[in-house]
Amino acid sequence: MAEADINITKQFSWKRILIPVILGLAGAGYLLFSSLNEERFVEVEAGQGEYVWVDQNSNGVPDFSDGKEFVRSSEGNYIRKNFKDMLREQTWSSNVLLALGLAVLTVIIRDGGYIYRIRFLTDKALSWRQSFRVIMLWEFASALTPSVVGGSGVAIFILNREGINLGKSTATVFVTALFDEAFYIITVPIILILLGTGVLFPETWAGSTLLFSSIEPLFYLGYGFIVFLTLTIVVSMLFFPHKFKRIVQRLFTLPILRRWLRKATKMGDDLIIASREIKGKKFGWWFKGFSVTYASWTARFLTLNFILMAFSDNVDHVLALGKQLVMWVIMLISPTPGSSGVAELALDSFFSDMFQAGVTLFLIAIIWRLLTYFLYLFIGVAIFPKWLKSTS
């Protein structure tokens, strides 16, 4: 372990991190600049525009950011606009500013809940300052990695560098993940009971999703997988971690899976360590941790709700929450860092029926990603060098 720490310290020395930090800041700035300057085609009354839509890829769905799908025409019904045009044309009334202020408040509540939870799960071994750094760097790592990969491995490393032993770090990350998945598993059936399935899924999707031409079967498959995986980990961690490790090792000795045997073995070891750490925890401990999780995740989804409310007088908050729960499965399997591109595409597909002007939805997408994605890129770049130095 000591040798591994030395190698990690060398790997993350100032000389080694200076270029990545500069590149990270430049990359975050470029992504933000590109998003703010991206042009989209917005539908207007027939004859009032400069472009007409041509279904270039024959999918029946306009891609408002693809210039190849629109050609100039004096009788067009589309015009081109960018974010700066939208800002100039938008009326910033007191109601709009209030709703956006509430969106910012939900971000504070969400992160505040995460900070409280990480301190609680580590039995207050972390100070408030340390807890803040852990959460911000965890979000930073998640923003830099594909959603399908996640930032859990980095989170264990972050906690360990903050002085939490490897066993407790592993257990904390495992329990955090279980709480997060439990929120999703419990909330989805509630929304389905309240709304049914007819209003949750978009009628059209910009192209096929993996092997699916519609989102609904993909959602149910993804939800079922989350339930199965969560139950497997819970039962294995609480009742027979050693047996689970042996089963996993045997499974990954198959020729088709052998290349991942080492990682599978490590996962089994982590599960055993986590099991030792959390055994004996009382019901009150689990209930408190999950309650904070539920509040934080609710605030996380309400961020978009309040942004929608800023630009619409008739937002069905339960419906908006339900659509986000479906969107979450799509974003979880995204191969892009922080679901970049996929999140915006999903937002357009799920909420286009709420806004006649595509320009409004684009404005919403930019503000949403500023509060839930770009924010953590810039905070992470700002605190990472100092944190690395202080924890060396």
Image (cartoon, rainbow, N blue to C red):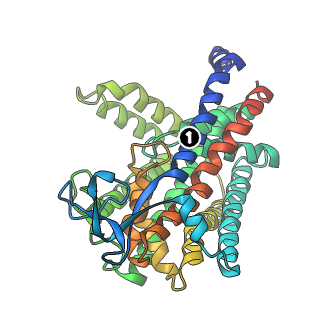
- Residue at coordinates 45% horizontally, 78% vertically from top-left? 319
Establish if 152 lies above or below 357.
Answer: above
- Residue at coordinates 74% horizontally, 35% vertically from top-left? 162
- Residue at coordinates 63% horizontally, 68% vertically from top-left? 295
Quarter of the image where the C terminus is located: top right
Q: Which residue of the protein is positioned furthest toward the front in this rendering?
A: 74
What amino acid is found at the position of numbered circle 1 in the picture?
Tyr
> Residue 59, position in %: x, y?
20, 60
Residue highlighted by disc 1: 30
> Residue 373, position in %: x, y?
57, 51
- Residue at coordinates 39% horizontally, 48% vertically from top-left? 334
Is 56 or 307 nearer to us in this picture? 56
Establish if 294 lies above or below 56.
Answer: below
Under tag 1, what secondary structure? helix
Query: Which quadrant holds residue 262?
Result: top left
* Residue 368 seen anywhere in this rendered image of the structure: no
Q: In this view, does 109 lie to the left or right of 208?
A: right
Q: Is residue 292 left or right of residue 273?
A: right
